[in-house]
Amino acid sequence: MIDIKFLNESDGQEFRMTHPKAERVLKDIQQWAQANDFEQVAFWRDPEDEHKLWVQLGDNRLNYWIHDSTFTEGKHETVEMQMDYARGAARRSAAGYGKFDK
């Protein structure tokens, strides 16, 4: 089972994404994570902009964020592409290019 979490950057507390339209998006993320061998996906809410959710794939927190409207507006048709971009950011970071992405 894939573990998908939403956390507040400011205090590390977990919160639930309960918007009715988020269910389909979360299902798509779960399928994407399983296909890409990630057991855990986390989204960290930016303390300065609550609409930014910074992506963490496995143990790697990335310099890539997804707007919360992806969940609140049920944008399931774009979430796979966004997760692919996040995976690309993880690969860039692992290759040492992360320092240039900031």
Image (spheres, rainbow, N blue to C red):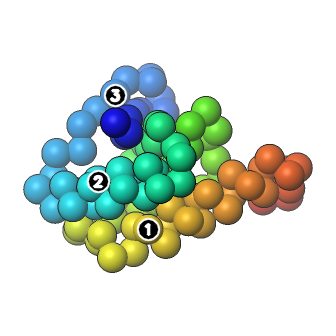
Of 13 and 75, nearer the camera is 75
Front disc: 2 or 3: 2
Which numbered disc, 3 or 1, marks the residue closer to the eye?
1
Rendered image quadrant of residue 25: bottom left
Mark 2 surroundings within 10 Å by alpha-carbon count, few (fewer than 14), some (14 through 19), many (20 or more):
some
Residue at 68 percent across and 58 percent down: it is 89
Q: Looking at the image, which residue is at 32% across and 60% down?
A: 28
Q: Which mark is residue 56?
A: none
Q: Is residue 98 above or below residue 47?
A: below
Q: Are marks 1 and 2 in contact (CB under 8 Å)?
A: no
Q: Residues within 10 Å of mark 1 (few under 14, many from 20)?
A: some
What is the three-letter code of the residue carrying label 3? Glu
Give coordinates of residue 66: x percent, y percent. 46, 59
Is residue 69 placed above or below 18 in the rendered structure? below
> Residue 1 versus residue 44: which sits nearer the camera?
1
Name the residue tied to disc 3.
14
Which kind of residue does numbered mark 2 sit on? Leu
Q: CA distance from mark 1 to mark 2?
A: 11 Å
Decide if residue 77 is on the left or right side of residue 80.
left
Q: Amino acid at mark 1?
A: Glu
Q: Quadrant of residue 24?
A: bottom left
Residue with the mark numbered 1: 80
**Residue 43 seen from this side:** yes
Above-or-below relation of 34 to 72: above
Regarding residue 51, the answer to whether it shows in the image is no
Q: Earlier in the sequence, mark 2 or mark 3?
A: 3
* Mark identifier at residue 26: 2
